[in-house]
Amino acid sequence: MSSKGLFSAVSGAMAQSSRLDTIANNLANVNTTGFKKDRQVFSEYLSANEKPNDVINVPRVPASIESFYDMQGGDNAYVNPAGTYTNFDQGSLRATGNSLDIALEGKGFFEVLTPQGVRWTRSGSLQTDSNGRLVTKEGHPVLREGQNDPSQRMIQVTSNNLTIAQGGDIFDGGNAVGRIAVVDFANVDDLQKVGGSLYALKGNATSQPTPTIEARVQQGFVETSNVNVVEEMTDMIAANRVFEATQHVIKAHDQMDDKLINQVGKV
């Protein structure tokens, strides 16, 4: 019994397992501020496209079809998990009434400073730390616009009574203290999630952050997750059904192999 069909079925089951993991992660973050859902990407791997052409050899096994007709690997195919991509569609804005909550309406990201360097986020649930700096819930300082050292671009305030304009300008008791750095990327696929609603550039990234005026800062709001629960549950049901179907195929191959070895072999 050939293992080619069995391998295709196993690779399909593994692909659906990865898809289920991605869906589960989306559902787990349905209430995470600024979270962007992920999607699994698959492609069909054809070994004929990877294997160079060889000279057809003289048949060695008379009973084998492959001996008379060299497929050059064209009959070998399986599901190739090509990774995930992030859907950056806008989430809905939810009013909180908190003057330190901000949301971006439009494309763009806030710049924050982490121990690993500058990172980007859509989560605008802010607060002030013991040093009077404007920081995220995780304690990462929010940065203002400027070309100097990021450590010199932290936003210092004296109270929580702030006014933040749609352009990102911050007023502390009527005094301007800077403009929140809002940037965008020519290719958002250059970004990768690094946890805590933060993004970093991939190692092979070609685009760099550039200031943008397309996004408007909305004070007193947060951006909710763009995960659609009904859509995710529908995808989960579909993935489960495909996974079960591949299990049936694997079981059928196992039964045929059993008959081939234990019954046909005794004839």
Image (cartoon, grey):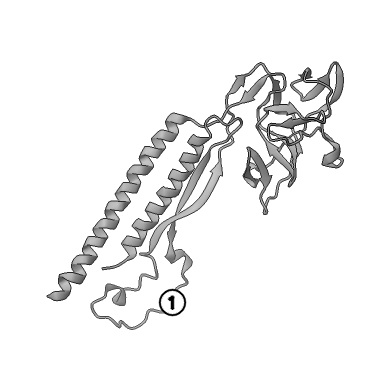
Using a 10 Å C-alpha cutoff, classify the residue at mark 1 as few (fewer than 14 neighbours), some (14 to 19) or many (20 or more). few
On the image, the x and y values in percent for residue 8 come to 36, 59
Looking at the image, residue 253 lies above or below residue 129: below
215 with respect to 235 (left or right): right
Quarter of the view holding residue 199: top right
Displayed quadrant of residue 48: bottom left
> The N terminus appears in which quarter of the rendering?
bottom left
- Which one is in front, 48 or 201? 201
Find numbered disc 1 in the image and state the secondary structure of the residue it sits on.
loop
Return the residue found at the far left. Answer: 267
Q: Please state the horizontal and vertical placement of residue 133, each as a whole percent of the image.
A: 80, 30
Q: How many numbered discs, if any? A: 1
- At 63% from the left and 39% from the top, the residue drawn is 196
Q: Is residue 73 above or below residue 161?
A: below
Q: Which residue lies furthest to the front in this view?
A: 130
The three-letter code of the residue at mark 1 reads Asp
Give left or right: position of 250 versus 135.
left
> Where does residue 169 sit, x and y in percent of width and height?
80, 24
Residue 145 found in image quarter: top right
Residue drawn at x 67%, y 36% as measured from the top left = 121
Asked whether, in this view, residue 182 is left or right of residue 51, the answer is: right
Q: Who is closer to the viewer here, 7 or 99?
A: 99
Give me the residue at 53% from left, 47% from top.
Answer: 84
Q: The C terminus appears in which quarter of the rendering?
A: bottom left
Mark 1 highlights which residue?
54
Task: Find residue 137 and report its horizontal and vertical position in percent.
Answer: 68, 31
